[in-house]
Structures are given as C-alpha cells and as structure tokens.
Image: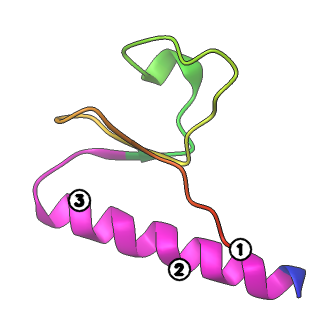
Amino acid sequence: MINNIKTLYDEKIKSLVEKYESQESRVITEPKTDELPFDLGNYQPDEWQSNKYVIIKVRIC
C-alpha cells in the first residue's frame, strides 16, 4: 500500500513538472528554504514554479 501511494505521488509530481516545464517555467521539486523568495515558516512545498510564484503541495488520499 505504501509503495502504491509513493508511486502515485511520484507520478503526479512528474506530470506537474512536465506541465510547467512545457510552459517554459523553472520547476524545483522539494525546494529548500533558501530557494524560495519568501518565508513559508514550517511549510515545505513539494514543488515550486519560479516565474509565477506557484507553490504546489501534492496529497494522495
């Protein structure tokens, strides 16, 4: 079950990266705090799209 969730998560991240990169965006997966232009406190996004300041958190339920 855990492997299936990890696989779904990885597939979703990959599809989002491909989507935003096809729009000529720079995408950082699992960004570090110093890679973000502002402080998010303890929030850790799964993905960061830099040209439009889009932060994505992926949840598999």
Q: Position of residue 7 (x, y in %)?
A: 68, 82
- Callout 2 amino acid: Glu
- Distance from the alpha carbon under mark 1 to that under mark 3: 23 Å
For this view, does 37 lie left or right of residue 56? left
Colour pattern? rainbow
- Callout 1 amino acid: Cys
In the rendered structure, find residue 37 and report the number of the disc placed on it.
Answer: none
Crowding at label 1, few (<14), some or many (≥20) Cα neighbours within 10 Å?
Answer: few
Q: Magenta residues, as a range?
A: 3-27
| Residue occupied by mark 3 | 20
Crowding at label 3, few (<14), some or many (≥20) Cα neighbours within 10 Å?
Answer: some
Which residue is located at x 23 percent, y 59 percent? 20
Label 1, secondary structure: give it. loop
Label 3, secondary structure: give it. helix
For the residues carrying marks 1 and 3, which lies nearer the camera in this image?
Answer: 1
In the rendered structure, find residue 11 and report the number of the disc placed on it.
Answer: 2
Label 2, secondary structure: give it. helix
Which residue is located at x 17 percent, y 35 percent? 51
Residue 7 falls inside the magenta stretch = yes
Going from the N terminus, do you reach mark 1 or mark 3 first?
3
